[in-house]
Image: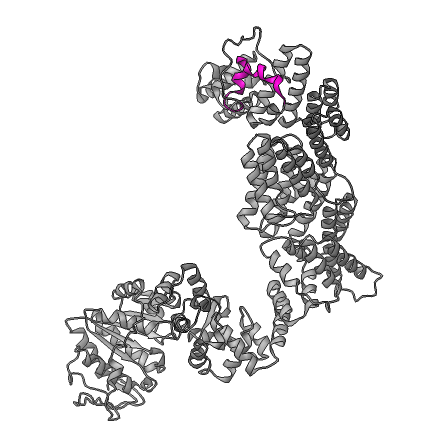
């Protein structure tokens, strides 16, 4: 017996009436017609091209939500095909196999592919004989030209029998049939088999979405002009949904300000709301509608979270079904979903009408579920929406996330979120978060008041309710220690910072290790604050230890800010110790660290650019220095951080001095910050500016008096003070001050260059020109690598005759001065100048240099000395560094000048 698709087996019947519907009614011919495209329809060539390419596979699926533009796209494409197209718009009544196949056969006859009467029609709406399907497949397979069958609204087909029958005909029709399904849901066909065989082309919602450029073109068809950046915002809001764009455009045409309407329209008050409520929401069950209305308060949700809001347990299957039905529920992966933005906006408005007074409770339930499952950012957002600020603050403090108000890309969001915290929030955690919020905005007065209140209420003897657990209390106290260290930094109080650091060390063993690992920014911030305070107080080596440890904190966005600030502080340390090149490299690394992460400026950042500006002044690159200073001023118009303020004052004053604005420099040299202790280096530089201003005004006595605050403990300040003494005619005092300089380790060129020039000036004044030349030569050698021009420009007229002499002119050529030696200048007799500190080469370095002088290659030197090529290169780098050169030939010449060869 032949197999029959239907309720029971019966023989096939082939009526000869060509337009007979199985129940006897006439066919509805509109179902076979290609839908008309409106005048504002936009042909999107990328999608048409994809459909053309899809003809290589037997099956194509256009799968998208209501209003995604599927039908018009398919109709526009089909209208341009050369091969016959059978179009059928499926209706709900087609769920019966006999009705569906009767209409499909009629569609094939209407386009001329089937001859009327050749195959016939099912006699019964409830079933179809397999011989009819076999005859249809055979007839199609024998057809000369392939036919394209488009089934629009295919999601209305819910009978598995029809899907199985379609698969049968598609298979046996062979290459003569190309089937296009236009659907809102996943069809019942075994798509996985077609995918595996490479026989399926899929065009889904992401591809159907309009791009910003396509949105601009669509709006132009509606008589509207919108720039691409504005269209991007509209596309983001509509997710490129075709119906949303068209309905928005139609409404905008009626507005007095179309561009503003498209930017600000209220979705729940638009025709889009009517469309979505009618096409999506009202077709759902009561349970599904309730679920959608409740999850509309969420940015994203999973079944467990949705169940918490509905107090039911059916969210998982409902969400899967909504996503499969393209009901504007987007799957994010790992069982997480989100609503289409416009749909969510409309649902929220609808929820306030249907479920009045429930929104705050929904936020409260969401916050508690998210807190239990470790989603802190969303916990805070929903707690705030519910008005539960104590709960939000408690979550921040207990999770040890207090440092996130100062670090990372979300710090600004957190500060803004808690700026709305109501005074009714009275827990210790709320006070602690208020303190962090205010200190993050450099509001020291209010921040300290809230911090003291929080500390009093967290004290063991306090009558306030204690945090839930010992670890929660420890986390809160560690948060207090972090804020104490920041307050100490902003007030320049080293003892307070040291106490905070010791407290933090005592608390760390009590805080859960996983919390500390999850929040490395806490330790990094503490070390940064401690290092900054130590630097301010002039404890350079202790500061370097803390800052270096902060730079070594684990990577990630959460520690970018403290790493950037610590690198900037280390750069300033290098600069203050006279190493401008090293300072520049660290400062560039600090700036790059912050820019890579896209961090906004904070009241304590920007030190890296200030150091770069200071180095630029020393190199007499005044335009670059001013640009860097202006950039810092724009990003940090005012700062309470003492180190940053002092750094800005230092650079600004030095730049003004160079430009001859002495009085303005004196005013700018004051950092204008109140601190618990004075900074020796900040005070020293302020004194230097005042002294230089007095000297420029012809008041040498006052200039000398101003230098009494400068000691040898600050080498860079001391050498500049010595230079001012020398310029004022007090060479003896200048040399005495140089002799008092105490450096930890080798002094940098920022110190040695000025020191050599001061001693050279003293020698020149004493009539010892040979010693002066030797000292100037040493200064030039040290300064050339760093391109330090300012020390030479500040020395005055006495050095010019020396620089005009041939040996010194050669050392200054190309970077300090470009003019040739004076005509007839006498070349000095006698041996070439030797450096102030003798250059010492190791025995192996001499061996390498001697062979380089004989024009041996690196490989030949290695072979001659029986060492590796890398070893030779290492020795050469050391030789270059010691001789202040960059090339082999220069190294040989310099070594001969210094009688090392």
State the residue at coordinates (59%, 65%).
378
Q: Which residue is at the front of the view, 560 or 796? A: 796
The extreme bottom residue here reads: 24
Image vertical order of residue 787 relative to residue 670, above or below: above
Residue 682 lies, in percent from the top left, at 71, 36
Q: Residue furthest right?
A: 461
Q: Is residue 281 above or below residue 253?
A: below
Residue 179 as seen in the image, left or right of residue 745: left
Task: Please state if 179 lies on the left or on the right of 840 as rendered.
Answer: left
Q: Is residue 901 visible?
A: no
Residue 719: percent from left, percent from top: 69, 25
| 274 relative to 755, above or below | below
Tell me which residue sits at (58%, 21%) in the image: 780
Quarter of the figure that contains the C terminus = top right
At 62% from the left edge and 52% from the top edge, which residue is drawn? 407
Residue 245 rendering spot, x and y as whole percentages: 40, 70
Residue 825 picture location, percent across and down: 53, 10
Colouring scheme applied when the structure was drawn? one colour
**Rendered image quadrant of residue 49:** bottom left
Measured along the vertical axis of the image, is residue 231 above or below residue 793?
A: below
Q: Name the foreground residue: 863 vs 222.
A: 222
Residue 528 is one of the magenta-drawn residues: no
- Magenta span includes 807: yes
Number of labelled discs? 0
Please identify the quarter of the rendering in which residue 165 is found: bottom left
Foreground residue, 682 or 526? 682
Magenta stretch bounds: 795-816
Q: Is residue 490 visible?
A: yes
Residue 625 vs residue 79, the one in the foreground: 625
Q: In this rendering, would 368 be left or right of 328?
A: right
Dominant secondary-structure state across the stretch colored magenta: helix
């Amino acid at each position: 017996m032949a197999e029959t698709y239907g309720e029971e087996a019966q023989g096939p019947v082939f009526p000869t009436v060509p337009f007979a519907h199985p129940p006897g009614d006439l066919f509805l011919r509109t179902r076979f017609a290609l839908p008309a495209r409106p005048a504002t329809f936009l042909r999107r060539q990328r999608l048409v091209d994809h459909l053309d390419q899809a003809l290589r596979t037997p099956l194509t699926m256009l799968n998208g939500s209501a209003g995604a533009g599927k039908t018009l796209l398919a109709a526009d494409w089909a209208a341009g095909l050369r091969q016959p197209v059978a179009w059928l718009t499926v209706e709900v009544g087609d769920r019966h196999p006999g009705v569906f196949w009767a209409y499909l056969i009629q569609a094939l006859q209407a386009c001329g592919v089937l001859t009327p009467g050749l195959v016939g029609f099912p006699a019964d709406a409830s079933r179809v004989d397999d011989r009819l399907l076999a005859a249809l497949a055979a007839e199609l397979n024998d057809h000369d030209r392939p036919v394209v069958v488009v089934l629009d609204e295919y999601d209305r087909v819910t009978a598995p029998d029809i899907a199985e029958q379609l698969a049968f005909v598609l298979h046996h029709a062979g290459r003569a049939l190309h089937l296009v399904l236009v659907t809102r849901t996943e069809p019942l066909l075994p798509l996985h088999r077609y995918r595996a065989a490479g026989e399926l082309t899929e065009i889904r919602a992401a591809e159907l979405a309009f791009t910003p450029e396509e949105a601009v073109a669509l709006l132009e068809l509606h008589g509207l002009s919108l720039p691409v950046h504005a269209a991007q915002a509209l596309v983001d809001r509509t997710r490129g949904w075709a119906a949303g764009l068209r309905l928005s455009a139609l409404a905008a045409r009626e507005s007095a300000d179309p561009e503003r309407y498209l930017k600000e329209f209220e979705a729940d008050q638009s025709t889009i709301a009517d469309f979505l409520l009618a096409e999506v929401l009202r077709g759902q069950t009561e349970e599904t509608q309730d679920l959608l209305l409740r999850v509309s308060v969420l940015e994203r949700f999973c079944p467990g979270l949705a169940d918490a809001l509905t107090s039911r347990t059916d969210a998982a299957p409902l969400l899967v079904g909504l996503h499969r039905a393209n009901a504007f529920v987007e799957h994010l992966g790992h069982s997480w979903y989100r609503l289409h933005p416009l749909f969510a906006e409309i649902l929220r408005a609808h929820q306030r009408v249907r479920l009045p007074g429930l929104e705050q409770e929904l936020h409260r339930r969401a916050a508690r579920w998210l807190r239990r499952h470790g989603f802190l950012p969303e916990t805070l957002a929903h707690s705030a929406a519910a008005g539960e600020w104590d709960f939000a603050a408690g979550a921040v403090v207990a999770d040890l996330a207090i440092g996130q108000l100062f670090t990372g890309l979300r710090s600004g969001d957190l500060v803004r979120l808690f700026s709305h915290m109501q005074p009714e929030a009275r827990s210790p955690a709320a006070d602690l978060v208020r303190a962090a919020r205010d200190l993050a905005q450099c509001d020291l007065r209010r921040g300290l008041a809230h911090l003291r209140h929080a500390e009093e209420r967290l004290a063991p003897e306090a009558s306030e309710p204690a945090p839930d657990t010992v670890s929660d209390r420890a986390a809160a106290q560690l948060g207090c220690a972090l804020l104490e260290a920041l307050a100490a930094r902003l007030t320049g109080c080293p003892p307070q910072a040291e106490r905070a650091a010791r407290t933090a060390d005592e608390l760390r063993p009590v805080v859960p290790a996983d919390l500390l690992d999850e929040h490395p920014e806490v330790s990094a911030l503490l070390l940064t604050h401690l290092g900054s305070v130590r630097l301010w107080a002039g404890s350079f080596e202790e500061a370097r230890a803390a800052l270096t440890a902060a730079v070594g904190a684990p990577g990630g966005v959460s520690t970018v800010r403290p790493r950037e600030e610590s690198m900037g502080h280390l750069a300033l340390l290098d600069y203050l110790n006279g190493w401008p090149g090293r300072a520049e490299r660290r400062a560039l690394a600090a700036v790059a660290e912050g820019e890579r992460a896209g961090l906004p400026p904070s009241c304590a950042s920007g030190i890296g650019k200030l150091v770069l500006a200071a180095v630029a002044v020393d190199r007499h690159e005044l335009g670059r220095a001013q640009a860097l200073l202006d950039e810092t001023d724009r990003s940090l118009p005012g700062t309470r951080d003492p180190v940053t303020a002092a750094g800005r004052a230092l650079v600004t004053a030095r730049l003004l001095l160079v430009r001859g604005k002495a009085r303005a420099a004196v005013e700018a040299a004051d950092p204008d910050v109140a601190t618990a202790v004075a900074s020796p280096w900040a005070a020293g530089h302020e004194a230097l500016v005042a002294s230089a201003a007095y000297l420029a005004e012809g008041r040498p006595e006052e200039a000398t008096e101003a230098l009494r605050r400068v000691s040898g403990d600050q080498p860079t300040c001391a050498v500049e003070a010595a230079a001012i003494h020398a310029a004022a005619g007090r060479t003896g005092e200048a040399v005495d001050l140089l002799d008092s300089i105490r450096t930890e380790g080798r002094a940098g060129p920022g110190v040695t260059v000025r020191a050599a020039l001061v001693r050279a000036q003293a020698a020149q004044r004493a009539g010892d020109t040979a010693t002066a030349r030797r000292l100037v030569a040493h200064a030039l050698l040290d300064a050339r690598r760093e391109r330090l021009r300012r020390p030479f420009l500040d020395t005055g007229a006495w050095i010019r005759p020396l620089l005009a002499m041939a040996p010194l002119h050669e050392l200054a050529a190309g970077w300090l001065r470009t003019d040739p030696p004076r005509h007839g200048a006498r070349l000095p007799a006698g041996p070439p100048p030797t450096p102030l500190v003798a250059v010492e080469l190791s025995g192996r370095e001499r061996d390498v240099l001697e062979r380089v002088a004989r024009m041996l290659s690196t490989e030949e030197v290695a072979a001659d000395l029986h060492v590796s090529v890398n070893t030779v290169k290492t020795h050469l780098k050391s030789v270059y560094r010691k001789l202040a050169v960059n090339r082999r030939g220069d190294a040989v010449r310099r070594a001969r000048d210094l009688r090392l060869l």
